[in-house]
Image (cartoon, grey):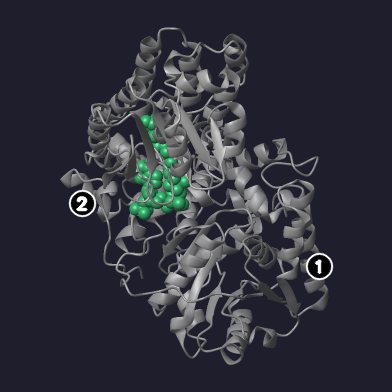
Amino acid sequence: MAVEKRREGETIVLRLSNGPVNALSAGNGFVDQIAAAVDEAAGDPACRVIVIAGAGRMFCGGADIGDFDGAPTQVSRVRDVIAAVEACEKPVIMAIHGMALGGGLELAMAGHYRIAQAGSRLGLPEVTLGLLPGAGGTQRLPRLIGAGAALDMMLSGKPVTAEQAASSGLVDRLVDDDVVEAALEVARGAPPLRRTGALPVPVDLAEAVDARRAKLRAGLSQAPARIVDCVAALSDDLAAGLALEARLFGELMRSEASRGLRHAFFGERTVARIPGLAADVRPRDVRRVGVVGGGLMGTGIALALLNAGVPVTMVELRAEALSKAEAAIRKTIQRDVEKGRIGQDAADARMAAFTSATELEALAEADLVIEAVFEDMGVKKQVFSALDAITRPDAILASNTSTLDLDAIAALVADPSRVVGLHFFSPANIMRLLEVVRGRDTAPDVLATAMALGKRIGKVGVVSGVCDGFIGNRMFEEYLRQVYFLLEEGALPQQIDAAMERWGMAMGPCRTMDLAGHDIGWAIRKRRAVEQPDRPYSGVIDRICELGRFGQKSGKGIYVYPDGRTAQTDPEITRLIEDYSAEIGLQRRAIGDEEIVGRCLLALVNEGAHILEEGIAYRPVDIDMIYLHGYGFGRERGGPMFQADLMGLPAVLDRLRALAAGRNGWAWTPAPLIERLAATGGRFGDLDFQDGNAQ
Ligand code: T1G
């Protein structure tokens, strides 16, 4: 971490160097180093112009997000250095390459002249963290590009290209070659001493603020509304605007939504790390992937691979199913062209990377094969036994199974170390979650290869050990168990769904199961009734299944779907639920949203704690990322384990014990891990299972 200084004639070049993104970290003193370097150059009589650039692959990725959980003064150090740059009596030229994001762009906007290299991107993504640009962005960006364009940029959080920045006035010059050399050339002339903060208030202010305020949507994060407030306060008094911005930033920084979103930001990166993996373990090369099975999942998996440029050979033994799969793949890729997402050349290239066959022998040269056939061990046995003989010994064999024992599948091949689970979530080309299941014998480099492939195709890969349902579905079973109990006790589907969606779930559980199909859950409950007779579900949901109401795909489920898509409540289901309660002699009672949300959330938390203590999940944050990316858990809520830490584990334990004393209390036996942490004042967030021994 350093501010590299280079003198070029009368110009001093300061190059920011701090880790992979040159984050403006106050916690490690980097921001103080920048301030000192600027101050020294400003006071250097031999220096006429200052150039600020970034080392490595970008200008600056923003303030250090990790600083925000610390003292609030960290961000004020960033503001101070930005103010010093703008007030400098010598021209400060900003030489931008790669990315200038958040505080990085705010620093650049305090410069007196900005040059950007073609291909670089500039943005204020703070809203994605439940924050607002807290170092002058709300006051300077509108002055440079107008209030409307500035609000759109800050409310979307999306970066613009250097080309767009040049045309909007955000940057003064666009160059194709070295941006520092270009800055030196400008420095040799007479660069302007133009202070952004002194520019006039944009003329479109009132209209732009009214239009965006009218479109604000309710939500946990107040960042969008506060961004509009800051822009609305624009005036000739820059200091007043900066003071309001700083105050509102502090409020947002302490908000649950921002803490949840920051947890998600770091969590998505943490889960990529496999604890205990030896430093010398390298992923294997994967140049061609085989996909066995041309059904819904096989087709989605093939698309996920092709869309990321990974060549695919699909094998489907039934010729008709194979041509149907190929047609579906072609149609989906072509739809991306029609929607302007990709060009025709890219679409053609994707299809050119797709080959298909009706014999498994076509996979003899595949580097990795993903089996996505029917969820039946007999069928898997046939496929894996054949693959074992046909594929290269160093080829990785992956199963997309979601309910079967991966270790039992691995036992079907001579070398089980090359078997891993790749549990995609439907639709496999859309859902970002990928559970990478580590079998008892899975080799470390096989696991690393699976995780690398997941990242390559844009997935959030999370390692799971082997258990029934792995991490996500195992917890979801306990969540659904409570939903069905709530139905028989007095709640109705539409109330449960509304309560969970108001709380932050993308979709309520009843609507979710109608979409996923109740037949799969019904089969699991029948299996569990034999395997775990002491853990029964409410029979109310089976009554619905016995009517053949399997959900949207059968036109009816818990809801009815007159247009095939829109869920409508069905009085027949209301009567069925009420009759079922009477049949089991249960007096229905009014159940509040708080109880609904509490029981559904605690069911996830408690099962998640069991999963952690069994070593199935490496860390609590792995569980959280699974729920954000696979189950529509509100991103601003951070995940079930994050929520438990917000509640406090002593309070969680008290709630579990109270529920354990009630009806179906057997479902609420507190996980020993929760008891241990509650007793010692610990948090899930403080746990980190470094042993890497997920079972
Ligand atoms: N702070 C701290 N760490 C950061 C960071 C940041 N701003 N950006 C990245 N990292 C870490 C990241 O955790 C990872 O660590 C490593 O750098 C590489 O990141 C006051 C309040 C810049 C597009 O929101 O979007 O400024 O896992 O894997 O894919 O108004 O990082 O290796 O240990 O993502 O090449 C605003 C966030 C901050 C940008 C690069 N800025 N970063 O993507 O690498 S708030 C942002 C990104 C702020 C001011 C406000 C991306 C990237 P590790 P990576 P990448």
**Left or right of residue 446: residue 518:** right
| Residue type (three-letter) at the residue carrying disc 1 | Lys
* SS for callout 1: helix
The picture places residue 187, in percent across and down from the top left corner, at: 42, 33
For label 1, the crowd category at 10 Å Cα-Cα, with few meaning under 14, some 14 to 19 and many 20 or more, is some
Whether label 2 touches label 1, CB < 8 Å: no
| Residue type (three-letter) at the residue carrying disc 2 | Arg
Toward which corner of the image does residue 84 lie, by quadrant?
A: top left
In front of the other: 159 or 200: 200
Q: Which residue is drawn at 26% across and 36% down?
A: 26
- The residue wearing badge 1 is 324
Q: Is residue 408 among what the camera can see?
A: yes
The picture places residue 664, in percent across and down from the top left corner, at: 41, 48
Q: Which mark is residue 409?
A: none
Q: Tell me if the residue at label 1 has its CB under 8 Å from ligand 1.
A: no
For label 2, the crowd category at 10 Å Cα-Cα, with few meaning under 14, some 14 to 19 and many 20 or more, is some
* SS for callout 2: helix
Tell me the CA gap for discs 2 and 1: 54 Å
Is the residue 659 above or below the residue 666 in the image?
Answer: above
Discs 2/1, front = 1
Q: In which quarter of the image is the C terminus?
A: bottom left
Q: Which residue is drawn at 50% across and 68% down?
A: 530
Sequence order check, earlier mark of 2 and 1:
1
- The residue wearing badge 2 is 676
The picture places residue 280, in percent across and down from the top left corner, at: 33, 75
**Left or right of residue 572: residue 446:** left
Q: Which residue is drawn at 50% across and 54% down?
A: 537
Please tell me in which quarter of the rendered image ligand 1 is found: top left
Toward which corner of the image does residue 639 lie, by quadrant?
A: top left
